[in-house]
Amino acid sequence: MKLFLRKVTYFALIILILTSIGLFLPTTPRVSESLLFGAIQKDSLLKNVESPRIIFVGGSNLSFGINSQMIKDSLGLNPINTAIHAAIGLKYMMENTLQYVREGDIVVLAPEYDHFYRKYDVVSEELMRMVFDVNFSNFKLLNFKQKLALIPHIPKYSLSKFKPNEYMNVKVDESYSVRSFNQYGDVGIHREPSDVIIPAYIMGKYNDDIVKQIKKFHCDVIAKGAILIISYQCHQDISFLKDVEKIKYIEQQFIDNGLITIGTPERYTMPNSLMYDLVGHLNTKGADYRTNLFIEDIRKANIITR
């Protein structure tokens, strides 16, 4: 029994030492190639792009779903697509963007519908890597609850730096690489239609806190002399029909809370012929189609005049 306890103690001590060392090792080549590192470019755009500006905030439904060149050519605005990954969480997306919002900016928030059926201060591996690998200065954007919730993720994160495949034969899908983003922050890789898009449905219970936090973001944006508008994510039509009640409830909450919206969820529902690989990702033709809808809606709402 003593021998067993001694071995367990030694093993635990080794894991503790490796975890401590791994926490301070440089980011691995595999992670450095990931789309999360696109945040460096996108934050640079937020800092340096000149007015008049239109800033897109949301998950990958935007990075895979907007043609910013069309927006610039049609609306005369300088677009910044900040979108990376929905799992980073709406809290981080909005608070990181808010740091850079200027007077006169148009901020377009297009959250994934799933965001409304999860915790606002959700924690994920993607969020952890955003602050530990990409930009540790943004650790301040996490609340105390999030910082505590990250602790269980640390061993896996640290020990991953000792895996050989993190350093050798690194291959990343070109659509999900740090190099996939163009000068505006869109995924600029040409994307062909996919034969099969597996439907995905919204899970969980509606969280009233999400719209409350969006209202707070709205007030913060206004305080900076900018304007916030809500747009709807692009969504596969089959998946939309399955979750139509949940999605329409989100729309009603926007209306009831006096938020400025453009379009409708139905308008941004897309057939499989316009989808890429997931229910919220558009192929190149689909992104152009959605962008045309967006441009029409912006003009109809006189957003630029406001």
Image (spheres, rainbow, N blue to C red):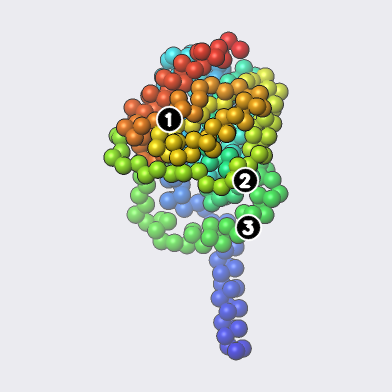
Quadrant in the picture for the C terminus? top right
Badge 1 local density, few (<14 within 10 Å), some, or many (20+)? many
Amino acid beneath label 1: Thr
Question: What residue do we see at 52% from left, 36% from top?
Answer: 245
The residue positioned 45% from the left and 40% from the top of the image is: 242
Query: Between disc 1 and disc 2, whose residue precedes?
Result: 2
Residue at screen point 67% across, 30% down: 215
Tell me: residue 82, above or below residue 224.
Answer: below
Residue 10 place in picture, x, y as percent: 58, 78
- Measured as percent of width and height from the top left, residue 142 is found at 66, 45
Residue 49's disc number: none
Circle 3: residue type? Ile
**Could you give the CA–CA distance between mark 3 and mark 1, rounded to whole angstroms?**
39 Å
For the residue pair 82 and 239, the one nearer the viewer reads as 239
Q: Residue at x 34, y 54 (%)?
A: 169
In the rendered view, tell whether residue 102 sits above or below residue 204: above
State the SS at label 2: loop
Q: Give the vertical position of 190 relative to 278 (above or below).
A: above
User: Which numbered marker is on residue 119?
Assistant: 2
Q: Compared to 116, does 31 lie above or below?
A: below
Three-letter residue code for mark 2: Lys
| CA distance separating discs 2 and 3 | 18 Å
Tell me if label 1 and label 2 are in contact, CB under 8 Å: no
Element class at badge 1: strand
- Mark sitting on residue 269: 1
* Front residue of this view, candidates 120 and 264: 264
Whichever of callouts 2 and 3 sits on the residue coming sooner in the sequence is 2
